[in-house]
Amino acid sequence: MKVLFIAYVDFKPTQFGATMRPQRMYRAFLEEGHEVKLLAISQNRIDWPRRKKAIREVMEWLDTNTPDLCYIESPVYPIILPEDYRLIRRLHRMGVRIGYFYRDFYKKFAREFPKRKDPVGWCKDTLKDMLQLKTDRALRQVDIVYVPCEECIEIFSEYDDVRPLPPATVDHREHRGRGENTSIYVGGITASYGGTLMLEAFHRLNEEGEYPLLLICRQNEWESLNSPFKAEPWLEVHHATSEQLVPYYERAGLALAINQGTEYDNHAISVKLYEYIGFGLPIVVCGSKSMERMIEEGGFGRRAECTPESIAEEVKCVLAHREDYAQKAEEALLRDGLWTHRVEQVVRELSEKKKKK
């Protein structure tokens, strides 16, 4: 199929956060054999001239080309440029079926993410809210609004067709983790992620035996973390990019997804959860109903309560039956865990919408 792929980030070799998902989806479209016209430039203020120029080029391309579908990976913030809104309107008027992945939805949880109180911060947040309302109105012109998980559908009831399109991964089974009692955690360790909770759990575990923990996090977060267990012999800390993680995953036998159980957490699914699956690792998760549901349905891990005692107990349980859980992780990967699976879903569902029209 001829596909117009729109993203709001620059594609770079180093992938992190907001840049990872759109690049992986773009590659998967190509791997599936589709002809892809790409618009991927940051919408940061300094990049506005480049993005406007790229949009003009796409508009000219549309003079002689009609894509079968358009897939949009949303920005972290609302859509900013008027040219982007005009592009979406034109695609809609052309009858092009559009799928829009809604990345961040903090505004749905105003209690957890209130506006800043200082005058400058309050003005910036208010402007962002106004742009988000404009973005939300523009989304009424798309055919399917995709969200990270099933739990999100209920909070996007203003749209006619909302469907889950969770993260995915690539097949890393050749680097499958084969550690015995070693666990790994990759990601944030601030209070909102439960870093201190995780370290206390492993302190308890290592009072009973040897349970090493590989912790991969940002250096500034590690330096600011307040915990009495930062110098323990069972703890190994690294500050690595996504491209440098393979050797650490190969040493692990279990992966951790620790959250704090906020309403936002309950409606989110982390990319790293699927990355764990890609390396064949069983998982212990806490503090996210969406991720807990996914793990329990797939059978490749266990759910813990957000207490050190519960996390420690579930880690021991999974490690005791590690091979069984790892087999379930591999089955989940091959069944529905790859980025190509997500592309197949988007193409199938947007094509069905086209037939109905």
Image (tube, rainbow, N blue to C red):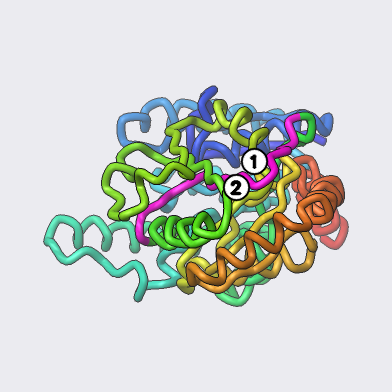
Q: Is residue 247 left or right of residue 65?
A: left
Quickly name the residue at label 1: 252
Residue in the foreground of this view, choosing between 308 and 284: 308
> Magenta span covers which residues?
175-191
Q: Is residue 289 above or below residue 244?
A: below
Q: Quadrant of the C terminus?
A: bottom right
- Quarter in which the N terminus is drawn: top right
Identify the mark at residue 183; answer none if there is no mark: 2
The three-letter amino acid code for the residue at tag 2 is Ser
Picture coordinates of residue 27, whole percent (x, y): 70, 31
Q: Say whether residue 189 is magenta.
A: yes
What distance separates the C-alpha of mark 2 from that of mark 1?
Answer: 5 Å
Please say if 341 is above or below 155. Answer: above
* Residue displayed at 43% across by 55% down: 199
Can you name the residue that lies furthest to the top here? 13
Residue 323: % across, % down: 81, 50
